Amino acid sequence: MTIQVIPDDNHVSRYVKPTQITETLRGICKPNSHVFRLRADYPPETGSEEFVSVDWLEYFKGDLSQQLNDICLVLKENRGFKVSLNGGFAIVQVGDVKDSDLGRTITVKTLGEQLDPSHSGIYGLKPEDDIVAQKIANRARFFKNTYCH
């Protein structure tokens, strides 16, 4: 598969660990800003991450439930994630990610991985972009994990 820019009207998801979930005063769960921040030194002693890892929902067929189920399988089988039933998924429209940039040029594109074609990245961020990460998190919808069994 070749690398391609994901259209603004499409969506990406990011797995949210239980420790990265914030509950609002109204009892609504949201991802906290750390979900969309680059790690400053990852892998250790290599410098900043190049992109925030996400998955392209529209790569998968079916409704949202089926798409998240397929992403869950990819996370567990292809990337070796331990997906907690207490975690969930942050879903955000690509156009909303790009509108959060505060002067940065943000792109969202696939990584071109043969065995994991939905794997994508949010490029153009820096580890210190706390406000941008918070804006993206605020625009994301959160779905409790009922997809991975």
Image: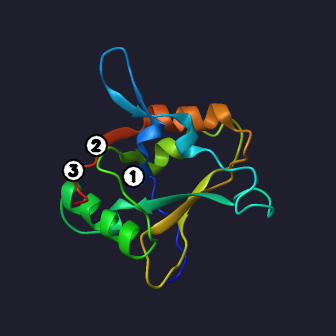
Q: Is residue 117 left or right of residue 26?
A: right
For disc 1, the marked residue is 9
Report helix, strand or loop for mark 1.
loop
Distance (Cα) linking label 3 and label 2:
6 Å
Label 2 CA crowd tier, 10 Å (few <14, some 14–19, many 20+): some
| Quarter of the image with the C terminus in it | bottom left
As drawn, the label of residue 146 is: 3
**Residue type pointed to by label 2:** Lys
For disc 2, the marked residue is 144
Distance (Cα) linking label 3 and label 1:
25 Å
Picture quadrant where residue 42 is located: bottom right
Residue with the most extreme top position: 25
Report helix, strand or loop for mark 2.
strand
Q: In this view, does 61 lie to the left or right of 79?
A: left
Counting from the top left corner in percent of width and height, residue 140 is at: 41, 39
Distance (Cα) linking label 1 and label 2:
23 Å
Circles 3 and 2, Cβ within 8 Å, touching? The answer is: yes
State the residue at coordinates (54%, 65%).
109
Q: How is the image coloured?
A: rainbow
Circles 3 and 1, Cβ within 8 Å, touching? The answer is: no
State the residue at coordinates (21%, 50%).
146
Counting from the top left corner in percent of width and height, residue 62 is at: 18, 64
State the residue at coordinates (81%, 62%).
45
Counting from the top left corner in percent of width and height, residue 3 is at: 55, 76
Q: Is residue 78 above or below residue 95?
A: below
**Residue type pointed to by label 3:** Thr
